[in-house]
Amino acid sequence: MQLTKQVLLDIEQERINQVCKWGKQNHSLEKWFVILSEEVGEVAQAIQSDDDWRKESDKSNIYEELIQVAAVAVSIAEQIKEASVIHHEETNVTGCYTSPTKTRS
């Protein structure tokens, strides 16, 4: 379990690094998929670094690349969760939508 905690801390640190570098990101799910796919592609490049047919890559950074993949996935999940929380705040306790401009009689 200690190893899992360390990996999760590394993912959290990568999320902090991403926010420092890019600011808070808010993309469509399609754009997020492109970003995530690019990160997964970097993992594939690192894994295949010994193959003659592909470009040079450093196999020693597979862990870092996987942390970046996880951090991007967390960023996507954060955006979805944030939208869900906002939607939840716009509904009352029974789950019925309450318009912010509608007044009760």
Image: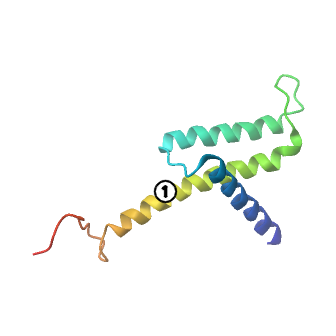
Q: Residue at x 69, y 41 (%)?
A: 40
Q: Identify the residue under disc 1.
A: 80
Up-down relation of residue 13 to residue 43 (above or below): below
Neighbourhood count class around disc 1 (C-alpha, 10 Å): few under 14, some 14–19, many 20 upward = some
Q: Position of residue 29 (x, y in %)?
A: 49, 45
Left or right side of 21 for 32: left
Q: Residue at x 61, y 56 (%)?
A: 74
Q: Position of residue 81 (x, y in %)?
A: 49, 61
Local SS, label 1: helix
Instruction: Give the image quarter of residue 94.
Output: bottom left
Amino acid type, residue under disc 1 in the picture: Ile
Look at the image and tell me in which quarter the N terminus lies.
Answer: bottom right
Q: Position of residue 95 (x, y in %)?
A: 30, 71
The residue lying furthest to the top in this view is 53
Q: Position of residue 68 (x, y in %)?
A: 71, 49
Q: Nearer the viewer, residue 44 or 21?
A: 21
Up-down relation of residue 19 to residue 54 (above or below): below
